[in-house]
Structure formats: structure tokens, C-alpha cells
Amino acid sequence: MRRAFAIAAVGCWLLAAACGSETEDPAAPAGGRAGTSGSSGIAGTSGEAGTAGTNGTGGVAGSSGRGGSSGRGGTAGSAGAAGTSGSGGVPDASTPDADGEAGGRTGSSAGCGKPLSSSDTPGRFVRRDITVSGVDPALREPTPGGSWTERVYYLDLPNDYDPARAYPLLFGGSGCGGELIRNGENGGFAVLPASNTDAIQIGLSYVWPEGGGPCFYDGVPNTPDLPYFDAVLAEVEQRFCVDRGKVFVGGFSSGGWLSYTLALARGNVIRGISPAAGGLRPEANRPPASHHPLAALLLTGENDTSNPATGATGSDAARDLILSINGCQGTDTVAWPTCAGCGCVKYTGCPDAYPVIRCRPPGEGHTDGGGAFKAAIWSVWSALP
């Protein structure tokens, strides 16, 4: 696996410094949201008692997962396998739906209607501490002072946050060693400005304290960053009003590799991804694929030698896997000029709800795509059904 070393990338949409990859992990999520009225609802694997997938079509049973009452899309049906999970959490993506179709979550999160607390400050990124469960105890701790279980993330609520409105949720992951937050402003990882009115944004951090680990950890199949993502998602959905069907993940360099890993492992949670300069983990270091289609806007610089697009772990291999999962027919493309200067093409045989767009900025190396790519990302995500 190739690793890019930290470089300055001021204004990049996913963080201020570039980095390459490690090899990411496939841990099953710590808490599933069971669907009581969803198509292909999957029960979770840890949490409090409840009832899983009793109305799902092709639901998969879980064991003591933290399921939710709002299921994973669709209408009530039969053949929902009984689970034992209960109330509120993140779906288990370790097993694909029995029907192999797009599951996807729908509805508003449990945090809708809850007033903001005195510590919530819309319009700027605020650091939040979180304790992560489900981390493999056999993992070595990061460098001295860091922790896989005591982590932080950065939350940006829309400037005029309305607890009655369900917002899209945008995750951003940085390149290695990137500066996350400067005086409440994002360090470049966010798609939208901190003062946005359109979405809730999350900045993912390597380990706390920052510097305790230089990159997202992916050298083993049980990366601690998978339960970290699950924990952040569950907490944000419990506290704030999220459109559960519109969770997106982007990332630059190390964050790009993380984006691909999360997309494949949590496809029943993530609606779309927009990694830049990332790649595909070797199969032995990947979580089991959830086999759920997703929208994908994938960028790698034409001359990126740190994380090149080609090869078994390049972004082209990730693209091919996503084309297959999405059920795209053929590999014909048309020019996609929305991202000016990004050298993008769109695959014409993909379902409209799950577009796949590949961008190769001509003459560019290890790049995040700049402001044009940020605008292109939001143009895609905001238009998805």
C-alpha cells in the first residue's frame, strides 16, 4: 500500500495537509439500527434490547443490536427475520440484505425536535469528545498520548439550525497530519463553509490528542476508525436532526482511503462518497462489503504518484467495484463539465439515483481538486433523491 507524506494543501476541501494510505479494516459496527418497517432491514450487533426487522422484507437477524423504530426504507412486508435489537443506533453492515438490493435508511433521526444545549454553537466547528466502544483490544495504542477509544470530532451545525428540519450529514476526513480546526473555521476538509445553512458537517480526527497518530489507521482489517465512525454517527443522530437517508462521506488522501472503506463497509448507512486521492484497500484488509449502491464522485490527479489511480489498490479498482455494486451496465461515459478543469466523465449505464463520476484533473498530482471540486460535490449530493 502506498502512503503519501504530509504536504501543504491550503484550502483543500478535506484538510490542509496531504497524506497517503494505510490499509483499512473491516470491523462490524457497534450497534445496529433494526428496521421495523424497512425493506431489507438489518439488525445490529450490540446494544439494548428491542425488536429487529419485524416488518422488513428479507431482514437479517441481529444479536442485541441497538435498532431503531424507523427502518431502512421501503414498505412493510414479510420474511423479516427476527432480531433481538432495540432502540436507536447504527445499522449492522457486516451482512448484505438477503435480496441484495439497495437498503438505505430513510426518515429523520431521533434528535429531531430536541432543542440545542448551551454548548451548541451553530455556524462554526466545535470540538467534541467521544468515547468509542467496540475497538479491538488487541490493537496497539497509537503513539504516546493518543487513544483509539477516547477520541474527538468536530461538529458544524448550520448557521440557522432548525431542530424541526432534517439536514443532510456530511463527514470529512483529512490527509495525514492535517490541521483540523483554526479558530472555529474548518481546516479545508468541509464541503460547505462553516456558516452554511444546508447541512450538518463533521470533521473526523485521527486520534486525540491530535498528533497522537498521523493518519487514519488502516494497516489491519479491524481498524479502530470504523467503530469511531459508528459512534460519531450514532451520537449526532441522537442529539441533532439528521436526514438518515442523506449521510455522505468525503476525504482527501488518508481521508480518501477512509471514505472508500466506509462506503463499502457501511453502504447501508452512507448515501454517497467523494474521495480525492484515495484508494481501495487490499481485499484482506477490507471489511465485508455491504453491497449497497451509492453515489460516487471519485477524483485522483492525472499525475498522482503518491496514490496513483491504477493498480490493484488504486481508485480505478475502487471505481470498478462500485460500478459492479451499483449494477451499472457497461463502461460508456460522457463528459461531465460540472467540475471545471477536473477532467470528469460520468458513466451512462448507472441508475440515476446512484451516479458514478470519475475525475482526473489533467497535469495534477496529489490534489484535493480545489474549490471547483467542493462545488461539484455539493451539486451532486444536494440533487440526489
Image (spheres, grey):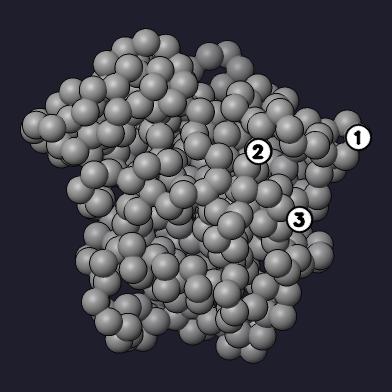
Assess whether mark 1 and mark 3 are in contact (beta carbons under 8 angstroms): no
Q: Residues within 10 Å of mark 2 (few under 14, many from 20)?
A: many
Point out the residue furthest to the right here.
144
Residue at the spot of label 1: 144
* Left or right for 247, reference 76: right
Element on which disc 3 rests: loop
- Which badge, 2 or 1, is on the more N-terminal residue? 1
- Amino acid type, callout 3: Cys
Residue at the spot of label 3: 176
Q: Residues within 10 Å of mark 1 (few under 14, many from 20)?
A: few
**Mark 3 against mark 1, which lies toward the viewer?**
1
Assess whether mark 1 and mark 2 are in contact (beta carbons under 8 angstroms): no
Give the Cα separation between the discs numbered 3 and 2. 16 Å
Residue drawn where x is 57% and y is 22% of the image: 120
Q: Position of residue 1 (x, y in %)?
A: 70, 67
- Amino acid type, callout 1: Pro
Please give the count of numbered marks on the rendered protein.
3
Give the Cα separation between the discs numbered 2 and 1. 16 Å
Element on which disc 1 rests: loop
* Left or right for 7, reference 151: right
Element on which disc 2 rests: loop
- Which badge, 3 or 1, is on the more N-terminal residue? 1
Give the Cα separation between the discs numbered 3 and 1. 17 Å
Q: Is residue 74 visible?
A: yes
Residue at the spot of label 2: 224
Using the image as rendered, state which of residue 57 and residue 350 is in the foreground: 57
Q: Residues within 10 Å of mark 3 (few under 14, many from 20)?
A: many
